[in-house]
Amino acid sequence: MNISSATFVKGITNAQEAFTDELFHIAVIGRSNVGKSSTINILTKQKGLAKTSSFPGRTQQINFFLINNKFYLVDLPGYGYAKASGTQKKLMGDLITEYIFSADYRLKKVILIIDAEIGPTARDREMLEALEQINVEVVVAANKVDKVKKSILKKQLDDIRAQVSPHVVMPYSAEKRQGVGELSNLLTV
């Protein structure tokens, strides 16, 4: 899919504020600091559209980006490690849960970003299992493939595929822009 326009529309801290119009949502989710915002910026070809940081847990709200006036690309807060208080982590976790599992809108697809070098963590697998319960299409983007030694990359990707089967696994690197076209093609709604 060629993304010709991408506009930040709004950020919310209460899932009930999510858009419930006729447009589909494609959500981007993953652990804190796995590259969600960088992925959005690369896919949309807009460097500062989604705020990035080396500070884990930077995204503390749900951010909506209108893509080609056809659907919303939704940047969710990261789960897992974040430099935030226990109360703030719980609020972010509740926000993710409420958005994905309780709100009334048209969630079409979820891009679950994992670290290709580490593979799916227990939290990643929990999220994937939860997403399977709501029968939404999930694409697993194995980010940071450029950090994996070439000699073990194929084995690492095979291991990831085995752990997340039957979902599509997209080898990807936001930093090296590897797999961008392929991931962009999966955004069709």
Image (cartoon, rainbow, N blue to C red):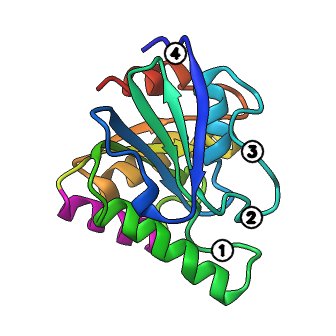
Instruction: Give SS at disc 2.
Output: loop
- Residue name at image x 60 percent, y 53 percent: 117
Residue type at mark 3 is: Lys
- Range shown magenta: 122-134
Q: CA distance from mark 2 to mark 4?
A: 27 Å
Of pointers 4 and 3, the one earlier in the residue sequence: 4
Label the magenta part by its dominant secondary structure.
Answer: helix
- Residue name at image x 80 percent, y 52 percent: 53
State the image coordinates of residue 128 (x, y, percent, origin top left).
33, 62
Disc 1 + disc 3, Cβ < 8 Å: no
For discs 2 and 4, the disc positioned in front in the rendered view = 4
Q: Can residue 175 be seen by looking at this rendering?
A: yes
- Residue name at image x 32 percent, y 45 percent: 20
Along the line of sight, which residue is nearer the eye, 157 or 79? 79
Instruction: Give SS at disc 1.
Output: loop
Residue 138: within the magenta? no
Q: Residues within 10 Å of mark 4 (few under 14, many from 20)?
A: few
Residue type at mark 1 is: Tyr
Q: Quadrant of the N terminus?
A: top left
Q: CA distance from mark 1 to mark 3?
A: 18 Å
Residue type at mark 2 is: Pro
Disc 1 + disc 2, Cβ < 8 Å: yes
Q: Quadrant of residue 12?
A: bottom right
Q: CA distance from mark 3 to mark 2?
A: 12 Å
For discs 1 and 4, the disc positioned in front in the rendered view = 4
Residue at numbered disc 4: 3
Of pointers 1 and 3, the one earlier in the residue sequence: 3
For discs 3 and 2, the disc positioned in front in the rendered view = 3
Residue at numbered disc 3: 51
Of pointers 1 and 2, the one earlier in the residue sequence: 2
